Image (tube, rainbow, N blue to C red):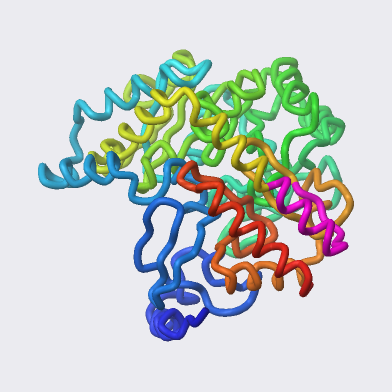
């Protein structure tokens, strides 16, 4: 495939946009080469500026569960746009989608819409601190909750010390209130509670991690976190920006039968438009202004275009009894095919999957946390990525990102990708 126009567009973008992109992973720094510029998309396919068709396995990082340019969503956005794009005032749409979301997700009574997953997680942390009267939070290495200061933290000098900033612009004062734990390590979390007794407001976690590749929770891990929170008067926050409305109608809470105190959403809940939300039971949500003392606001929150798109998406997912089973079956089919091809090529690998989230790690050892994810052969992954790209399949341009499967994929599409993996694997 040729990418001459994408290369020219990237060179032009670098002159006026930092790094030529508006989000760092798009720059292809992790895999090398020049990013692909998309012209349009439909169903399971991307069409780039050079006229290439690519089978899409990231789907805008998750929300395109029913495929790109899903007609009911597109029509809803067009209809709403004709009536105005932003008001900064309440609309009936907000109440309608809120009611539907609350009916679909376990353990929530009220929901507030914001503009991104980052904003949802940031607001969830503020609410947890306000509700508990405590300052510290626990997050897990390798889990990404957006670029809010509280989340851009790396490990401290030991298991029970606070972290330090891993981005300039994040202050030490902010970092001291963020405690970093190892994913799937309950003992580590218990140590943090013991060293910070009565100070921890919340644990925030991706119930299925998607930002170190797909890393599922070990058996008993989420249950253990729930108990530690209950024992210590701490809130459990599920960041379901990726998993919400994707792994099940009610997200990870439904899939794993674990109650979270606060849930953050994004991506899917807006049908692919810029949107996020956070939700909880009444006693917590009533701490938000204007009812309570915790302030959160946004002129574009509940934007009618995003609400119209999200409403159509949630309606479709709510009405389709077979959607999550189909996604599971297609992803399992893809996993089986990938395994067969990598085995034939004699490559060391691990595949992690939960529902329609899946990732390939080029290391034979289990990948259970950020440390083990970092042991993969990234040089092999780079060749794998570019080989698949040349064959017409687009996966995440990083070994540390999950793939997302869409119901718009046909088994013929999956077979095409599996065959491509077979050819590429022989060259690695």
Q: In the image, is residue 349 part of the stretch drawn in magenta?
A: yes
Q: Position of residue 82 (x, y in %)?
A: 11, 46
Q: Is residue 73 left or right of residue 24?
A: left
Q: Would you say the magenta stretch is mainly helix, strand or loop?
A: helix
Q: Is residue 103 above or below residue 177?
A: above
**Total count of labels:** 0
Q: Nearer the viewer, residue 31 or 334?
A: 334
Q: At x 77% / y 26%, what residue is drawn?
A: 197
Q: Position of residue 40 (x, y in %)?
A: 35, 63
Q: At x 19% / y 30%, what residue is drawn?
A: 91
Q: At x 85% / y 32%, what residue is drawn?
A: 191
Q: Is residue 101 above or below residue 417?
A: above
Q: At x 74% / y 25%, what residue is drawn?
A: 225
Q: Is residue 163 left or right of residue 148?
A: right
Q: Is residue 199 above or below residue 144?
A: above
Q: Is residue 276 visible?
A: yes
Q: Position of residue 246 (x, y in %)?
A: 52, 35
Q: Nearer the viewer, residue 125 or 270?
A: 270
Q: Nearer the viewer, residue 337 or 231?
A: 337
Q: Is residue 144 left or right of residue 246?
A: right
Q: In the image, is residue 122 part of the stretch drawn in magenta?
A: no
Locate the C terminus by quadrant: bottom right
Quadrant in the picture for residue 282: top left
Q: Position of residue 254 (x, y in %)?
A: 58, 21
Residue extending farthest to the left is 83
Q: Is residue 130 left or right of residue 43?
A: right
Q: Is residue 136 visible?
A: no
Q: Nearer the viewer, residue 238 or 319?
A: 319
The boundaries of the magenta stretch are 335-351
């Amino acid at each position: 495939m040729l990418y001459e126009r994408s290369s020219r567009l990237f060179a032009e973008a670098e002159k006026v946009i930092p790094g030529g992109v508006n989000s760092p992973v798009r720059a292809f720094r992790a895999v090398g080469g020049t990013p692909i510029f998309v012209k349009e998309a439909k169903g399971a396919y991307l069409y780039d500026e050079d006229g290439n068709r690519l089978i899409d396995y990231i789907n805008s990082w998750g929300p395109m569960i029913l495929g790109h340019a899903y007609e009911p969503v597109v029509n809803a956005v067009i209809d709403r746009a004709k009536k105005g794009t932003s008001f900064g005032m309440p609309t009936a749409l907000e109440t309608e989608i809120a009611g539907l979301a609350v009916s679909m997700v376990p353990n929530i009574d009220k929901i507030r819409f914001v503009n991104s997953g980052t904003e949802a997680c940031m607001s969830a942390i503020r609410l947890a601190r306000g509700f508990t009267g405590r300052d510290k939070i626990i997050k897990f290495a390798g889990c990404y909750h957006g670029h809010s200061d509280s989340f851009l933290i790396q490990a401290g000098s030991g298991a029970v010390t606070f972290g330090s900033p891993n981005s300039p612009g994040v202050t030490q004062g902010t970092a001291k209130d963020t405690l970093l734990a190892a994913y799937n390590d309950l003992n580590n979390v218990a140590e943090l509670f013991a060293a910070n007794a009565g100070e921890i407001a919340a644990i925030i976690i991706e119930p299925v991690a998607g930002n170190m590749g797909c890393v599922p929770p070990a058996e008993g891990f989420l249950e253990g976190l729930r108990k530690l929170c209950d024992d210590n008067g701490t809130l459990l926050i599920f960041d379901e920006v990726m998993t919400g409305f994707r792994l099940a109608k009610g997200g990870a809470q439904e899939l794993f039968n674990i109650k979270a105190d606060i849930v953050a959403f994004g991506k899917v809940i807006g049908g692919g438009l810029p949107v996020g939300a956070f939700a909880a039971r009444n006693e917590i949500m009533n701490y938000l202004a204007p009812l309570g003392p915790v302030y959160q606001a946004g002129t574009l929150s509940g934007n009618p275009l995003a609400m119209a798109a999200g409403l159509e998406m949630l309606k479709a997912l709510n009405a389709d009894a077979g959607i999550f089973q189909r996604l599971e079956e297609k992803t399992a089919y893809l996993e089986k095919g990938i395994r067969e091809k990598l085995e034939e090529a004699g490559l060391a690998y691990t595949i992690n999957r939960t529902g329609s989230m899946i990732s390939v790690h080029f290391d034979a050892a289990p990948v259970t946390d950020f440390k083990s994810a970092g042991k993969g052969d990234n040089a092999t992954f780079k060749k794998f990525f570019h080989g698949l790209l040349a064959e017409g399949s687009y996966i995440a341009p990083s070994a540390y990102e999950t793939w997302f499967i869409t119901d718009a994929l046909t088994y013929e599409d999956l077979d095409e990708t599996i065959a491509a993996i077979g050819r590429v694997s022989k060259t690695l």
